[in-house]
Image (cartoon, helix red, strand yellow):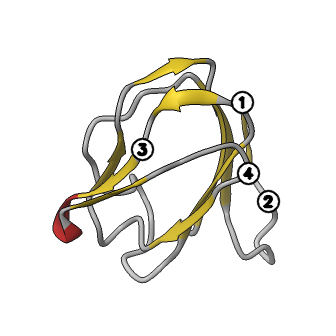
Amino acid sequence: MHWVTDEKGCFSYRACLIDVFTEPRYGLGDLSDGWALMTLLSRYRGGDLCITEMERRFVHKLGSISLIRGGRFEHYSLKWDGTRFCLVSAMH
């Protein structure tokens, strides 16, 4: 499910991702200095957020909020078990 805010909104792109697996990538259409925000709304196992340039992975659990420069840093989620609901907002 995708929805778009008006031109006055901070985040011009918003989506609810349900069990969407992403390969390592830079935010598609994200501003290079813009922010991408991810909020997790379900319980599952695995699915850590990885940021390639930092060589780090961050544990993602129900209620976690991640804020990154989506157009600047390559990022992806590891595989998970269960159903994963994630709200994503980005500056395009």
Helix, strand or loop status at disc 1: loop
- Name the residue beneath numbered marker 1: 1
Considering every residue shown, the one lying at the far top of the view is 82
* Type of the residue with mark 2: Thr
Which residue is at 44% across, 35% downward?
47
Q: Is residue 49 left or right of residue 6?
A: left
Q: Where 54 falls versus 28 (above or below)?
A: below
Q: Is residue 41 left or right of residue 86?
A: right
In this rendering, the label closer to the viewer, 2 or 1? 1
| Neighbourhood count class around disc 4 (C-alpha, 10 Å): few under 14, some 14–19, many 20 upward | few
Q: Which mark is residue 63?
A: 4
* Type of the residue with mark 4: Gly
User: x, y (%) of residue 21?
Assistant: 42, 27
Q: Quadrant of the N terminus?
A: top right
Cβ–Cβ below 8 Å for labels 3 and 4? no
| Neighbourhood count class around disc 2 (C-alpha, 10 Å): few under 14, some 14–19, many 20 upward | few
- Name the residue beneath numbered marker 2: 5
* Type of the residue with mark 1: Met
Q: Which mark is residue 21?
A: none
N-term-proximal mark, 2 vs 3: 2
Helix, strand or loop status at disc 4: loop
* Type of the residue with mark 3: Asp
N-term-proximal mark, 1 vs 3: 1
Q: Give the Cα separation between the discs numbered 2 and 3.
A: 28 Å
N-term-proximal mark, 3 vs 4: 3
In this rendering, the label closer to the viewer, 2 or 3? 3
Q: Which mark is residue 48?
A: 3
